[in-house]
Amino acid sequence: MGKAFELIAGFVTAPSTTFTALTMATGSSLTVRNAPLGSDVRLLQCWSDQQTAGNIRIRSPKLHDNVQGIRLFSVASEVEPLFPMGSYEKLIPQDVLVIEMTGSATGGDIESFVALMYYSDLPGADARLISPEEAIRRMSHIVTIENTLALGTAGGFSGEEAINAEFDLLKANTDYAQVGYSLSSECSCVRWRGAETGMLGVGGPGNELRKMMTSEWFILLSRAYQLPLIPVFNSANKGAVLLDGVQDENGTDVTVTSIFYELGMPK
């Protein structure tokens, strides 16, 4: 089956106390992708990056209700998962979600929302995803690669560069499992994408303080949801393994340390 794992993002500008619909980042959509009916489609996790505390509302006639749906509260500068880890919302292919936010009333302030989607069978996709157990059995070395992303000020994804743009360290024709990352500064999210993910972005919260969470982010997700969610990239494609992120209007650059396991034969 064609597994797919996707990070989507959107933002609002100075919504104040009025629930305001997201403007989606380029490449992101609130329309659930067209997977086969009856296949496993999940909203796994979500979070926000807010400059003022506010609410998030996720609704659809196909969720519990279309009035409040899933209503969440997020405080300022806490880029943390909002669902209990391991809990998820089942989605229906081609349903259109309505996601709205409240937050800062200051002109120009950008408040961002990010979600992780999982598809058990998405036509045209076949992401290379493995379990923590397989990653550990095959691990030869821990490898870290640093990239400094020049993130923009307009919301949405920006700062894209290849994984080998600053340090070209990967061995030829070798698989690497990405288990986590760490950050120098807060942002809404960081993501990685390449041929191995079907060019759909995978990623996590832009939290620079919770390194115990981000350093094993994909391991945590895999164990919480009992799914193989650790992406594997091959060094042959290193020039096309791309990183970017989402930042608010302040445009703070972020240094990302990607944490990989070099994979060999199972031990």
Image: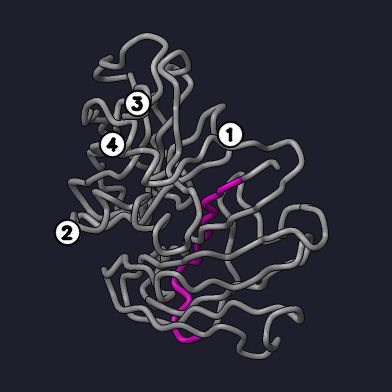
Which callout, 4 or 3, points to the residue nearer the camera? 3
Which residue corresponds to the image point at 28% horizontal and 36% vertical from the top-left?
258
Which callout, 4 or 2, points to the residue nearer the camera? 4
Q: Residues within 10 Å of mark 4 (few under 14, many from 20)?
A: many
Q: Is residue 96 left or right of residue 18?
A: right
Indicate yes or no whether the magenta region holds residue 16: yes
Seen from the viewer's position, the closer of residues 266 and 85 is 266
Disc 2 target residue: 209
Q: Secondary structure at mark 2?
A: loop
In this rendering, the answer to whether 238 lies above or below 157 is: above
Tag 3: residue type? Leu
Please report whichever mark, 4 or 1, sits nearer to the chain's N-terminal start.
Answer: 1
Quarter in which the N terminus is drawn:
top right
Residue 30: give x, y in percent of width and height.
66, 61
Seen from the viewer's position, the closer of residues 128 and 75 is 128
Residue 58: give x, y in percent of width and height.
59, 77
Please report whichever mark, 4 or 2, sits nearer to the chain's N-terminal start.
Answer: 2
Q: CA distance from mark 4 to mark 2?
A: 15 Å
Q: Secondary structure at mark 4?
A: strand
In this rendering, the answer to whether 203 lies above or below 100 is: above
Q: Residues within 10 Å of mark 2 (few under 14, many from 20)?
A: some
Indicate yes or no whether the magenta region holds residue 71: no
Please report whichever mark, 2 or 3, sits nearer to the chain's N-terminal start.
Answer: 2
Q: CA distance from mark 4 to mark 1?
A: 18 Å
In magenta, the rendered stretch is 4-18
Disc 3 target residue: 263
Which residue corresponds to the image point at 35% horizontal and 70% vertical from the top-left?
50
Disc 4 target residue: 258
